[in-house]
Amino acid sequence: MEGDGTGTGTAAAMAGGRLPRSAPHPLSKDVLGYDDDDEEEEEEDDLEVYSKNGTFADTSSNSITMPTSPSSMTNQHTLDDEPDKDLFVAVDDPQQHATAMETYFTYRILTKTTRSEFDSSEYEVRRRYQDFFWLKTQLEAAHSTFILPPLPEKFSMREMVERFNESFIEMRRKALHKFLNRIADHPTLSFNEDFKTFLTVQDLAPHKKLGSAFLSKMEETMRAVANSVKSVKNRPDEFNAMNEHVDIFRQKIGTLERISQRTVKEFKEYSLAMKDYSPVYTLWSKSEKELADPLTGVASSIDSCYKATEGLTTGLSEDLPPTLHEYVLCAETLKSVLKRRDVIQADYDSRVDSLANKKVEREMLEHSEQSFTFGTILGKSTEEVKQQKQQKIDQEIEELQADIAQFEDKVEYANTNLKADWKRWYMNMRSDLKSAFCNTAENNIHYYEECLATWESFLAVQQTEIKMDEKSKNSG
């Protein structure tokens, strides 16, 4: 599967161009960022049912407002809390809007910044899901080989029913908050003009209309070209390895997500069963006077364990599955970015091949003994016709060389961006998954310790009562 890159070297040499320089293997320490310094550092949608013609301006005055999230920036953070950051973004306060045409949610976007390109230090705007989608589309068009953070999907059929559920809206808000903060923390994407517009402009509609037709056409073209590129000859080994790594990662992270969802579901079912289990012992204790105390103790213990299970289920559902799902979506993004990089290289390779063919054609023309009959019929000498053909080929060669120089820079730029973002993505992924797994482990430990303490306390009481009963029998 991995090529040795010799084909590209030969073609580039024939074309007279220089090959974009190679880089370390993507699974090596250099590319993945897995080095000693990093290890030391580590230690220390708006859910809408909408019409095509609906706009934000159609919002009903009878909007339904949900409480501001307790995790909002205004409640928890200021720029002083993180002095190294010069741009802080938060998503909170989801509001439901109903019109004759549609029902949808908007989210408040709060921005604080010390950057000089902003006219103010604080901004507050409201955005709906399709605005977030517009931003992602704009960023993809401007930075095709950067790894953009994934947006949460619009909604599934099951989520259609739950789209106004408060816990679901909160989960969506968190995902959108993370999306914007990943962009805000990016050294290049955070300076994108469309991102600035998204954060600062009250009415986004004029900006969304501007160039939308062009972007739509370009997106269709890019998708068609990407689908037509089945494989790239001479793809550097490092990008072959990246593709293999993403395929394996996508399979493993997808399996983990399915297991985590099943685990949460089973804990929810177990929690509901325990909720119904405790009253059974309470009712039983009323009909068994001699066993009333131990039965009441069992009922109380089960009730305590039920509450602990409910807490664990909430913790698991809010932490591990969303993190795993984000990286399931990331795997799809990575495949798309690698494909777009291949499209750029395919353009470069096709021009290198064309140039090599033109040079061969010119060389054959120089040694050709053809009489160029058609040209001589028009009254031109054989040598004159031959010379005109050579001039035409020379001009085509010159144009191809200029194209190759431009596409060589594009390939270099795409490779450099992707390798840098791959390292950044890998480090974020490792940190996020480590945090999610550690939180899950801590939640489980706390849960089982709590349940163990509950039952140990129950046993201690029962053992004390048994000893007291034995004493009274012996003394009697």
Image (tube, rainbow, N blue to C red):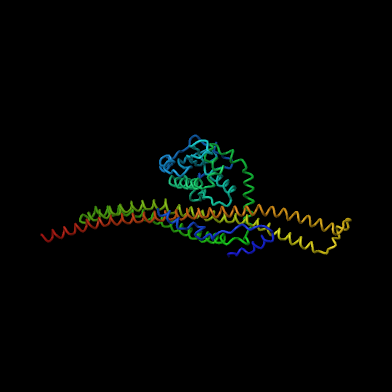
Query: In terms of depth relative to the viewer, which is nearer, 279 or 104?
Result: 104
Extreme top residue here?
Answer: 61
Q: Number of numbered discs present?
A: 0
Residue 108 visible: no
Query: In terms of depth relative to the viewer, which is nearer, 84 or 138?
Result: 84
Q: Position of residue 85 (x, y in %)?
A: 46, 44
The N terminus, quarter of image: bottom right
Q: Position of residue 312 (x, y in %)?
A: 37, 53
Q: Residue at x 56, y 42 (%)?
A: 194
127 shown above or below 440:
above
Query: In terms of depth relative to the viewer, which is nearer, 319 or 438?
Result: 438
- In this picture, residue 435 sits left or right of residue 364: left
Extreme left residue here?
Answer: 476
339 shown above or below 71:
below
Q: Position of residue 360 (x, y in %)?
A: 74, 62
Q: Residue at x 31, y 55 (%)?
A: 451
Residue 335 visible: yes
- In this picture, residue 353 sits left or right of residue 80: right
Q: Residue at x 76, y 56 (%)?
A: 393
The C terminus, quarter of image: bottom left
Q: Quadrant of residue 196?
A: top right
Q: Position of residue 317 (x, y in %)?
A: 42, 52
